[in-house]
Amino acid sequence: MDLKPIKIEADYRQALAEVESLFDVELNTPEGNKLEILTTLIEAYESKHYPIELPLPYEAILYYLESRNQPISSFIKGFKYRGVTEDLINETLNDIGKV
């Protein structure tokens, strides 16, 4: 595959296939350089066509706790002042109300 901008989905799929074939190459070789360039092109295409939105703060916290099998109470205990926890809960409820 010749290196070229990824403009359409077919280019994107072709670049992904090429990256897969180069996955185990040594860095700082011609093949390694090609892999690095392709991944940069793929990243640019994906950020434009498949953007990932940042989660809401409470979603990030819940994900973090769930991924570690931690109860919400373990998170709340970490706050020194009760008001911080209440502010977080109120903000969460406000965000939920927007949905």
Image: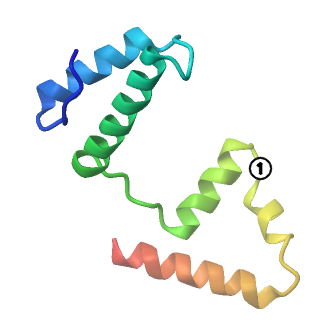
| Rendered view: 88 above or below 34 | below
Q: Please give the count of numbered marks on the rendered protein.
A: 1
Q: Which image quarter: residue 43?
A: top left
Instruction: Name which residue lies at 55% across and 69% down.
Output: 57
Instruction: Name which residue lies at 16% across and 27% down.
Output: 11
The residue closer to the viewer here, 28 or 66, is 28
Instruction: Name which residue type carries label 1.
Output: Gln
Colour basis: rainbow
Left or right of 53: which side holds 91? right
| Rendered view: 21 above or below 5 | above
| Rendered view: 38 above or below 29 | below
Q: Secondary structure at mark 1?
A: loop
The residue where tag 1 is placed is 70
The residue closer to the viewer here, 28 or 73, is 28
Image spot of residue 15 (x, y percent): 27, 23
Farthest bottom residue in view:
83
Instruction: Name which residue lies at 30% across and 15% down.
Output: 17
Image spot of residue 13 (x, y percent): 22, 22
Left or right of 77: which side holds 58? left
Image spot of residue 6 (x, y percent): 19, 35
Bin the neighbour count of mark 1 within 10 Å (Cα to Cα): few under 14, some 14-19, many 20 and up. few
Left or right of 78: which side holds 52? left
Instruction: Name which residue lies at 39% across and 78% down.
Output: 97
Name the quarter where the N terminus is drawn: top left
Name the quarter where the C terminus is drawn: bottom left
